[in-house]
Amino acid sequence: MSEKIFDRETMLDLTVNFIPLGILVFFIGAFVLFPTWGVDPLVTGLQFAIVGVTAILLTILTYYAGKAISTAEKEMEREHE
């Protein structure tokens, strides 16, 4: 059976990053559906670039943090055996 990368404990540790990621995704959707300040290509592009790049970087950070947490937990379990 294949072993999961993220177990339940790791997912609980990563919820700290899932909440801001959800907020960023919400704002991307809100800005797409309700362009409050109109559609100026420069301002809209900059707005989506800032929020989008932040969301992408947070996703990457969350993945590597989860991987590091999972690896550290497995090493600690091996040491206590």
Image (spheres, rainbow, N blue to C red):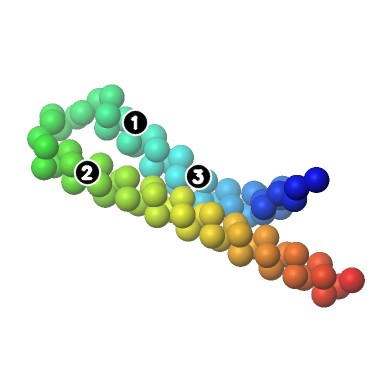
Q: Amino acid at mark 3?
A: Ile
Front position in the image: 34 or 58 = 58
Decide which of tag 3 and tag 2 comes sooner along the chain.
3
Q: Residue furthest front?
A: 1
Please report the residue visible at 32 percent of the width from the left and 36 percent of the height from the top.
28
Which marked residue is nearer to the observer: mark 3 or mark 2? 2
In the displayed structure, does residue 70 sit left or right of residue 29?
Answer: right
Mark 1 vs mark 2, CA separation in Å: 12 Å
Instruction: Give the percent coordinates (x, y) of residue 17.
Output: 51, 51
In the displayed structure, does residue 10 sit left or right of residue 56?
Answer: right
Kindly check if marks 1 and 2 are in contact, taking CB atoms under 8 A apart as contact: no
Determine whether the residue tagged by mark 1 lies in a helix, strand or loop: helix
Instruction: Give the percent coordinates (x, y) of residue 67.
Output: 61, 59
Decide which of tag 1 and tag 2 comes sooner along the chain.
1
Say if 28 sits above or below 34 in the image: below
Please report the residue visible at 82 percent of the width from the left and 75 percent of the height from the top.
79
Front position in the image: 23 or 39 = 39
Q: Residue furthest right?
A: 81
In the displayed structure, does residue 28 sit left or right of residue 3?
Answer: left
Say if 13 sits above or below 79 in the image: above
Residue behind mark 3: 19
Mark 3 vs mark 2, CA separation in Å: 20 Å
- Specify the label residue 29 is tagged with: 1
Q: Amino acid at mark 1?
A: Gly
In the displayed structure, does residue 9 sit left or right of residue 62?
Answer: right
Kindly check if marks 3 and 1 are in contact, taking CB atoms under 8 A apart as contact: no
Q: Residues within 10 Å of mark 1 (few under 14, many from 20)?
A: few
- Specify the label residue 65 is tagged with: none
The quarter of the image holding the N terminus is top right
Residue behind mark 2: 47
Q: Amino acid at mark 2?
A: Gln
Please report the residue visible at 61 percent of the width from the left and 64 percent of the height from the top.
68
